[in-house]
Image (cartoon, rainbow, N blue to C red):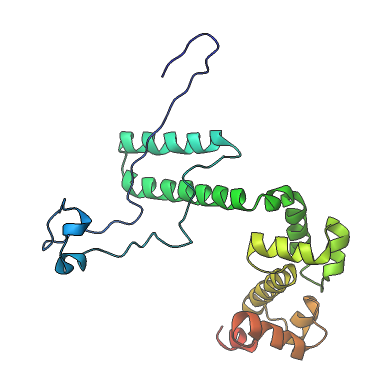
Amino acid sequence: MKVGTGMLRQRQTHLHFDLIFEEDSPDVKISFKPLEEISEEEMVWFREDVLDNNAFKIASHLRLRNPVIIEKMLFEIINEFQMKLPYYETNVKGMFIQLFIHLLRENYWNQNPHLVTNMDELVKIRSYLKHHIDQKVTVDELVHISGISKFYLIHLFKKTFGMSPIQYHQMLRIEKAKETIQFTTESLTAIAEKFGYSDIQSFSKAFKKIDGVKPSFYRKNK
């Protein structure tokens, strides 16, 4: 670290980790042979690169929206490791997973900057859906709330939350209806009406589509 006139103080933190750990093979020795000198028999000893998939690919350089958050998480992991309090190993694993997920999301936002630009509107829509689980909601309503065109809104929401806004709303309604079935004695017809379904048939059809079973399954298995 160098500090001089007109220069900013800089520091670089290093964290070495094994995301997925496998014990060394007792039958395979460490080899420093060049690839062209490795025999066919030795080639089969190579383990599959489980990280070489789209779920874990992160750019070699990330422009972080808030670097201070990452720095804080790094130093917390280092401090926990150095302190070695009881159960520190388990805690460090959990802290690292949080850090890794944060980096994965930062990478995702870098690849999809239009989602970040519209995040306030998307969060507003999600909140609206959560507070209107007792009724049907249309895309036109959401367009009016957000000011985003219909097809672009569906595209943005799906890229952010993994499903369309209507599918998300349906999931919320069914999950809440399931709780009501399990923990109250209300009739299925009353519950269907409570969550905005016109009749028990449409409720049952929507329920089975989301949960894989009919609503009566949870009443029978109480």
Q: Residue at x 52, y 8 (%)?
A: 5
Q: Quick one: which residue is furthest to the front in this view? A: 36
Q: Quick one: which residue is furthest to the bottom in this view? A: 201
Q: Is residue 12 above or below residue 190?
A: above
Residue nearest the observer in this picture, 182 or 59: 59
Q: Is residue 197 above or below residue 61?
A: below
Q: Quadrant of residue 65?
A: top right
| Image position of 156 (left or right of 143) | left
Residue nearest the observer in this picture, 79 or 24: 24
Q: Quick one: which residue is furthest to the top in this view? A: 5
Please give the count of numbered marks on the rendered protein: 0
| Image position of 73 (left or right of 184) | left
Q: Residue at x 77, y 75 (%)?
A: 195
Instruction: State the image coordinates of residue 96 (x, y, percent, origin top left).
Output: 42, 47
Q: Quadrant of residue 21?
A: bottom left
Q: Quadrant of residue 38?
A: bottom left
Instruction: State the image coordinates of residue 59 (x, y, percent, origin top left).
Output: 49, 48
| Image position of 75 (left or right of 67) | left
Quadrant of the snapshot with the N terminus: top left
Q: Residue at x 55, y 33 (%)?
A: 68
Quadrant of the snapshot with the C terminus: bottom right
Instruction: State the image coordinates of residue 139 (x, y, percent, origin top left).
Output: 82, 69
Q: Is residue 203 above or below residue 148?
A: below
Residue nearest the observer in this picture, 50 or 170: 50
| Image position of 111 (left or right of 151) | left
Instruction: State the image coordinates of residue 29 (x, y, percent, origin top left).
Output: 12, 57
Q: Is residue 218 above or below residue 81?
A: below
Q: Residue at x 66, y 49 (%)?
A: 113
